[in-house]
Image (cartoon, rainbow, N blue to C red):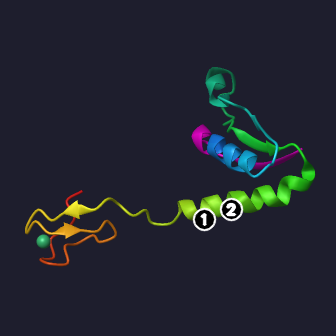
Amino acid sequence: MKRVFDHIDFTIVGHLQSVLEAAGIRTEIRNEGGSGAAGELPFTQVYPELWVLENQDEARARALIKEFRDREHEIPVGPAWTCPACGEEIEGQFAECWNCGAENPL
Ligand SMILES: [Zn+2]
């Protein structure tokens, strides 16, 4: 077994598990809800960890995780918005109204 990922946020670990499982990689999460042990382990932060069961899947799992992490850092495109100054409909990737220069109020 190989540990391929850990993160403070369990939802991200859980999401990556489903990504890997969808690619046919068998996985296991350890330290599920580990932070619940707070009073007992005051100086040790225990993060949920994602493990692959088969060592030969490690490289593929890491590639999938990297792909996911790279995508996560892309700037998200917001929803389309209506300019409060002139009423123009503006696409989500623009922070300012192309018509009058007003800023996206969202
Ligand atoms: Zn405008």
Q: Residue at x 32, y 59 (%)?
A: 79
x then y, percent, for residue 36: 62, 24
Figure quadrant of residue 44: top right
Check the picture and name the quadrant holding the N terminus.
Answer: top right
8 part of magenta stretch? yes
Q: In the visual, does 23 lie left or right of 81?
A: right
Give the camera-side residue of 3 and 43: 3
Tag count in the figure? Answer: 2
Q: Position of residue 43 (x, y in %)?
A: 67, 33
Magenta stretch holds residue 3? yes
Q: Secondary structure at mark 2?
A: helix
> Is 56 left or right of 96, judged from the image as shown?
right
What is the three-letter code of the residue carrying label 1?
Answer: Asp
**Residue depicted at 19% across the width and 67% down the height:** 89
**Residue contact between numbered discs 1 and 2, judged by CB atoms under 8 Å:** yes
Residue sitting nearer the eye, 9 or 43: 9
Q: What residue is rendered at 27% in x and 70% in y?
A: 95
Q: Which residue is mark 1?
A: 70
Q: Which residues are magenta?
A: 1-12
List the residue tagged with mark 2: 66
Relative side of 4 to 98, left or right:
right
Q: Which residue is drawn at the image coordinates 66% and 23% (left, top)?
A: 37
Q: Amino acid at mark 2?
A: Lys
Tell whether circle 1 marks a residue whose Cβ is less than 8 angstroms from ligand 1: no
Does 20 sit above or below residue 82? Answer: above
Q: Is residue 69 above or below residue 14?
A: below
Q: Quadrant of the C terminus?
A: bottom left
Q: Position of residue 39 (x, y in %)?
A: 63, 21
Q: Residues within 10 Å of mark 2 (few under 14, many from 20)?
A: few
